[in-house]
Amino acid sequence: MNESLQTLLSRRSIRKYKKEQITDQELNQILEAGMYAPSAKGLQGASMVVIQDEAVIAAISAMNAKILGTDSDPLYGAPTVVIVFADPERSANAWSDGCLVMGNLMNAAAALGLGSCWINRAKEEFASPEGKALLKKWGLPEHLVGVGHCILGYPAETAPPPKPRKDDYVIFVK
């Protein structure tokens, strides 16, 4: 089977990570894949913020946990978090563009043998006063909308097997 297709079929969400940080080379390859995700009219309505600072990751995790209503770490101890944002002022399709970026990030990580997982609630986090303050601190406009967190790292668990695909996943109209 084609290597790219094999990666797409075998990628799984990883929820347990080693503490060891990924290399800059690995990170840059993943980010480049994100930057080359398709975007409506080529407007590139998404952007990424990379966080590797443990204290900032802990703060983001706490915000996310509060929204989720838990005390656990919803970022699963991943040493790198890439937050993808949509800029609705740049493109009416920025949210979709951001979703494509997230997919490219996760698939690129899998191609390099790294673990990844899409973590939700970025929209709620960055709509909050605390999230708006972070955007301002990072020099970003407050109107950005959080699409998701792509957590990255070396897996500390074996990828789970795929779940069976539903029977009516594809409908043909010929």
Image (cartoon, helix red, strand yellow):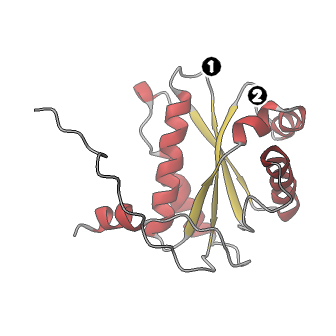
Residue 136, position in %: x, y?
85, 34
Is 96 placed above or below 109 here? Answer: above
Quarter holding the C terminus is: top left
Q: Residues within 10 Å of mark 2 (few under 14, many from 20)?
A: few
Residue 79, position in %: x, y?
72, 68
Q: Secondary structure at mark 2?
A: loop
- Disc 2 target residue: 141
Question: Residue 165 falls in which quadrant of the image?
Answer: bottom left
Q: Residues within 10 Å of mark 1 (few under 14, many from 20)?
A: few
Is 164 placed above or below 69 here? Answer: below
Between the residue at mark 1 and the residue at mark 2, the CA separation in whole angstroms equals 10 Å
Question: Residue 140 falls in which quadrant of the image?
Answer: top right
Instruction: State the residue at coordinates (56%, 69%).
Output: 115
Mark 1 and mark 2 residues within 8 Å of each other at the beta carbon: yes
Choose between 15 and 31: the one closer to the eye.
15
Instruction: State the residue at coordinates (75%, 68%).
Output: 77
Question: Residue 139 falls in which quadrant of the image?
Answer: top right
Q: Which mark is residue 52?
A: none
Instruction: State the residue at coordinates (42%, 64%).
Output: 163
Is 115 placed above or below 67 here? Answer: below
- Disc 1 target residue: 89
Residue type of the residue flagged with mark 1: Glu
N-term-proximal mark, 1 vs 2:
1
Q: Secondary structure at mark 1?
A: loop
Residue type of the residue flagged with mark 2: Pro
Residue 133, position in %: x, y?
89, 35
Residue farthest toward the front in the current orientation of the protein? 167
